[in-house]
Image (cartoon, rainbow, N blue to C red):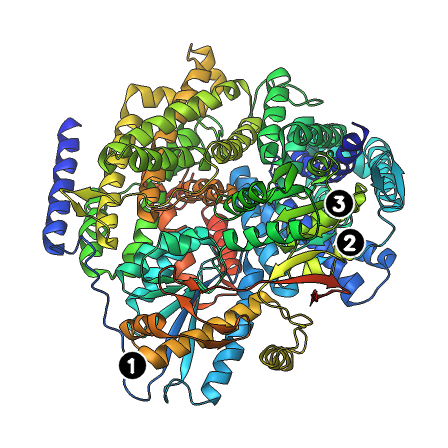
Amino acid sequence: MARNTRRIAFAGIMATTAALALAGCSLSASANGPSAGASAGSTVYFGVSSATTGQYAQYGEQFKKAFDLAVEEVNKDGGIDGHPVALKYEDSQSDPKQSVTVAQKFVNDPQISLVFGDYSSAASIPASPIYTAGKLLQYGFNNSNPDFTAKGTQYQWSSAITTSASYTWTADYIKKQGIDSIGVTYLNTADWGIPAFQAFKAEADKIGLKITDAEAIDPTSDDYRPSLTKAVAGNPKAFAHVGYGPDAAKLVTQLRAIGFTGTFYGGQDEQSFDGTPDAAGSVIGTEFVSTSKAPEVQAFVKAFKKKYPDEKEVTLFEAGAYDALHVAVAAAKKGGTDRAGILKGFQQITDVPSVVYGKLSFDKETRRPASPQLTPTVLKDGAWVAIEG
Amino acid sequence: MLDTLIAGLLRGNVYALGAVGISLVFGVMNVVNFAQFSFFGLGAMLAWFFVVQLQQPFWIALPLVLAICALLGLVINVAVVRPLAKYLPLAAMLSTYAVAQILDNGSQLAFSAQFRSFPQVLPTSNLHIGNMRFGTSDLVMLGITAVVMIAMSLFLKYGRAGRAIRATAQDQEAALQMGIPVGSVQNVSFVIASGLGGLAGIFFSLYIGVVNPVSGLNIGMTAFVAAALGGLGSLVGAVVGGFVLGILEAFGIYWFGDAARQIIVFVVLLVVLIVRPGGLLGKVPLLSTEPLTGTFLGKGRPLRIPRWVWIAAFVVLGVLVPILADTYVLTTGTQVLVYAIIAAGFTVTAGQAGVLALGQAGPIAIGAYLSALLSVHLHLSFWLALPIAGIGAAVIASVLASPIWGVKGHYISIATLGLGIAIVALIQLIVPQGIYGIPVPSIAGVDLNTPLAYYLIDFVVLALTLLVMWRIRRSHLGKVISSVGSDEVAALASGVRVRDYKALAFAISAFFAGIGGSLLAHQYTYIDTTMFTMLMSLLVVTIVILGGVGLPYGAVVGSIVLIGAMELLRFTPEWRIIVYGLVLILVVRFRPGGVLVRNS
């Protein structure tokens, strides 16, 4: 048997050596992605890496609707200097195991000159090295984890406000309402909830907003009552939740069920939260309010509801994706439709018309929106409205 | 205190309903039914559909939902589970996992993946004891559970069909010989269990207020633990287990925080299983039948593979693929290879020692984190971090798993499932943030970070893994471990220390899981705990079962099929998971012992 083992081991070493030799020096990534480019009149393709199945499929659906609307509009207006735009979707389930293969697939596809996604940072960040090696711009338009861009390269861009920025704002806003003590829950997730809470806490400590108790909650849990009883035991004036819509919907219902009546700072413009009776009166800061009177917002909301008559609500998810496509088109117009051109375009564009920000410019260093503004909004009758004054 | 107790009672109520269904099916079929979890989500979505979309009164929707779930349960049993349970309970279990995937994604196609707010049917906060508010809704739920449970126990005690169910659960073969139509009994049990699953789903959504098609998974897992806690197969035990777990969980969360919830559940389960190995009300199995151990000779034997196939496979995977394939195929290939390494290492536990451990994500995560932390903070080279990750995973996982080897039968699977989840929760407590910038492998300062380089590294590690596994199987040690899996009692009678060898097999598997985790970490360059899910553990088990539980090289085939198929099915995005489930069922149907195993 030992003879056999040796023989197999020998064969293994030989085969590997042969393969290494044949493969030459291509073991080290020297960014030899295929040169992408579009000849005159040909279609410009963008890739979308998102979840169409699995636990995040809800967001994949919302993105797709907004993307399709934006593509339709762009092509009606003559595309990118005569080139029509089209999207190629790949399902990653926002699972890193699949988002890396999707990334490689897009990098290899010479037609693709930019990729949107992925939805979650845990899927986007593992794919980043592949996009960087392929010199393909990865536009994680909704990745609010600061490290997506901070730890990324010049190929990672995002038009989302970072969680640290938005939760610093939240702490300031709460304090400004004359509230001096607050109970907090936050999602116990490494890529989102924990860094967001740390930003909130740092700001709260700085401005003298007392956190009576902060409870980490597991996003897969459903019953938060034991945590909530503890979180409100110190009689805070108000309550803040660092998390998303569906978990906030459960949370606010249970918070009211245990008899807490202070203002709830949390939630998200999203169907389940908006439809939860106990969520009424919740306050959040947001970049996008569908009830805003700004003409570009009204035009977008109208066009969206016309194309999708069944959709009752238009949220930041749709608006963000809609904006992202227009930003990509603006960059392609400025710098060119191939991969290098798009990157150049992103570095140059300023004041792109945006339904989220009014006008969007990137900070060239952080590759995030420059000085983004948040609007305080309150949930009334199932819709978020800006708080005046 | 009172608040927490009430919260615990209410959640225990839902667990109890779910646990009864799981226990019932397990009792009469000896199959762990993963599809049961899907009925929670499905029941909830159907109820939402009838009440919100079709504007039907809740009291009409309720029986409709129960009827639909019950009917679906019947179809699943007749079409999928029963034909397979005859061959191998394990194959049936795998197929219920496939059915669960189909149900979840079918429900998502029908109702979309959106979270929906569930209508308030009855007041939910009109009453209170102290600060804790609750509503008529909660009382009605408790009442319905009580009525259902009393009706069930009367039916099982006095009804003809009920008595047949009990007889079948006690001894299937004896029941058959006494003229009990076991087939119909199993159908009835499935119908009842599915209906109860739907009911639990509705209650769950009434209580929580928000639902989407996959929201049943988590509650299903906990209900499963509750069933084990009470004693699988014991219906009273399931109810007791549900309430005990609900209340202990509520107090645990109050004292230690929700972040520790999964650890609390696992510790409760472990303590109960150590004190009472058969669950709270279950019988301690004298002669345990583990899900993977068949009769003395097993149900099939491996296909004979001529030597040239080995050489050909080696040349194709090691030489032709790296030369000919494009980087997309290579990137997919790296994922296939890493999972093949993990799964091949797992065959010694699953195949030889006969322990169906369901928590491999735990050791994978340990390996990934160890390797990442060592190379990021101590600047250790990848080549050193890789073996340390393996050894570390083996040592840490073995220490944490040491109390569970006295547990018997299916309980050991459940204990390892809990262990896997608890390990990941523990890592989350120790390292709350993700780890960035994990260095890629390099030689002499040259980074090996192309898909081809990753592929070749993984390929060499896989070849070594298979070599080691092959040597272990042929060694005296391997034979002893196999004896534990083939017939535990005979092994024990021959003086083999069964517990120790199970632990050793698990340590070997954990070593390769740790290696796999390290490889993944250095290729992704970023890790956080959301990557190491229960689905990852199930994937490893599925790969091993598909390839043939005892065959390390079968794991390679299983990995190619299961991970490759997900990529091949990209042409049909919405139906991808459903087709995947169907493929899985078909493979299991025609190759119940695994692709590389011939029926004897």
Instruction: Please name the residue that numbered disc 3 is placed on.
Output: A254
Disc 1 residue crowd, few under 14, some 14–19, many 20+, Cα 10 Å: some
Residue type beneath disc 3: Gln
The residue nearer to you, when weighing B292 against B423, is B423
x%, y% of residue B306? 23, 43
* Mark 3 residue element: helix
The image's mark for residue B532 is none
- Residue B376 is at least partly visible in this image: yes
Quick check: B426 left or right of B106?
A: left
Q: Residue at x 52, y 65 (%)?
A: B574
Choose the circle earlier in sequence order: 2 or 1.
1
Q: Is residue B29 visible?
A: no
Q: 10 Å neighbourhood of mark 2: few (<14), some, or many (≥20)? A: some
Residue bearing the label numbered 1: A38
- Whole-angstrom CA distance, mark 3 to mark 1, is 55 Å
Q: Position of residue B119 (x, y in %)?
A: 79, 57
| Mark nearer the viewer, 2 or 1 | 2
| Dot 1 amino acid type | Ala
**In the rendered image, which quarter is residue B170 located in?**
top right
Q: Which part of the image, by quadrant, shows the N terminus of chain B?
A: top right
Q: Where does residue A264 sit, x and y in percent of width and height?
A: 71, 50
Dot 2 amino acid type: Asp
Q: Are marks 3 and 1 on the same chain?
A: yes
Query: Looking at the image, is mark 3 or mark 1 earlier in the sequence?
Result: 1
Left or right: B382 with respect to A159? left
Cα gap from disc 2 to disc 3, whole angstroms: 9 Å
Q: Spatial distance from mark 2 to mark 1, Cα to Cα? A: 52 Å
Which is nearer the eye, B80 or A359?
Answer: A359
Question: Badges 3 and 1: C-beta atoms under 8 Å apart?
Answer: no
